[in-house]
Amino acid sequence: MLLQNKVVIVTGAGGGIGREIAVAMSAAGAAVVINDVGASLDGGGRSSSPAEETKAIIEAQGGRACISTDSVAEWAGAQRIVLAALDTFGRVDAVVNNAGILRDAMFHKMTPDDWLSVIGVHLNGSFFVSRAAAEQFRAQKSGTFVHMTSTSGLIGNLGQANYSAAKLGVAALSKSIALDMARYNVRSNCIAPFAWSRMTSGIPADTPEQKLRVEKLMQMTPAKNAPLAVFLVSDEARDVTGQIFVTRNNEIFLMGQNRPIRSVHRQEGWTPELIVEHGFPALRPSLVPLDRSADVFSWDPV
C-alpha cells in the first residue's frame, strides 16, 4: 500500500489513462478525487457519467473516492477541485494533471478556437490546478505533482501545433514547479504516456500499413501508464523531481532535456559572412533532424 493515507486528485479521470491512474491510486491505498467534466474529445458537452463510472469501480474494490465535475480550464473550477479534496478527505497530497482534449488540424488550417481550447485545458488547466494545490502543499511542506506531457511536444508531430505547444509547455511548467517548490519538499515530474484511448482512436486505419500500426498501438492499454504514476506519487520517489518519463507498453524511458550539443567561438566575434563561412558549417553536422515522435520511437512496443 504505497499510498496509504494519501489523497490524490486525478483530472480527466472519467476514462482512459486518467481512469486507470485513479483506480491504481486507490488500489495503492489513496483516497481519490475523480475530476472529469464528461466532455467529448473536442471538449464539447458535459456529463457526470464517466466520473461516476470510475467512482463505482473504485468503491467496488473497497476504495474511497469523490467526484468533481469542475473544469480545469477555469481558475475558479481549479479552486473547487482542490476544495473537494479538503472538504471530503481533509487533505491533499498529490495532483495528477491528466485532463485533455484534442483539436487536431494542420497549422495553416488551425483556427484560433482550436488553439485556445487546447491550450486552455492542457496548459492553463495544469497551471490552475497545480497553483490551487500549491498553497496547501506549501503549508504542509509536502506534495507531489505528476503532469501528463506528450512526445508530440517533446519531439514533434504532424497536425498538432496546439497540442504539441501545450504539452511542451507542461514540461516547462513542471520543471519550474520543481525548482520553485523544492524548499517546501514539493516534487514535480512528467509522464509522456503511450496508450490506445479515445485520444488516439482517430488515427487513420485505411491502408494495410496504417492498420498494422493501429494494431500495435492497441496493445498499449491505458493501464500500462498507471504504475509509474503511483510510484512518482509515493514516498519511494521522494528524491525524484524535475524529470520527464515516457511509458510505452512495458517500457519506461527517462527523457533527456535541452542542453547544448555543439558550439563555435571566434575571439573577434561574428559577422553574417563568417557564420556562412565558418560557424554554420561547424554546427551543421549536429543539427537536430525534423523528425516526429513515430520516427524516434520507431520500433514495435515491447
Image: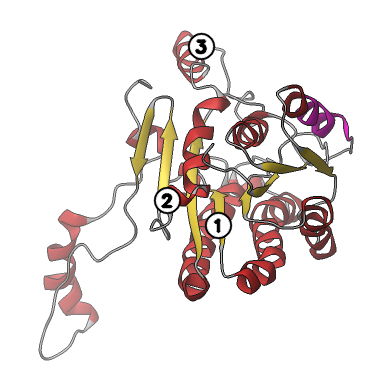
State which quarter of the image contains the N terminus: top right
Helix or strand or loop: what does disc 1 sit on?
strand
Q: Is residue 250 magenta?
A: no
Going by the numbered disc 2, the residue's amino acid type is Ala
Return the residue at label 2: 237
Label 3 belongs to which residue? 211
Q: Main secondary structure of the magenta part?
A: helix
Segment tinted magenta in the rendering = 48-56
Residue 144 is marked as: 1
At x 39% / y 25%, what residue is drawn?
250
Marked residue nearer the N-terminal end (2 or 3): 3
- The tag earlier along the polypeptide, 1 or 2, is 1
Quadrant for residue 222, please give it.
top right
What's the residue at 14%, 74% (across, down)? 264
- 14 left or right of 183 in image: right
Residue displayed at 54% across by 60% down:
169
On screen, residue 71 versus residue 18, left or right, reads: right
Q: Nearer the viewer, residue 187 or 273?
A: 187
Q: Crowdedness of circle 3 by 10 Å Cα count: few (<14), some, many (20+)?
A: some
Residues at marks 1 and 2, CA–CA distance in whole angstroms: 10 Å
Q: Are marks 1 and 2 in contact (CB under 8 Å)?
A: yes
Q: Is residue 11 above or below residue 28?
A: below
Near mark 2 (Cα within 10 A), the count class, few <14, some 14-19 or many ≥20, is few
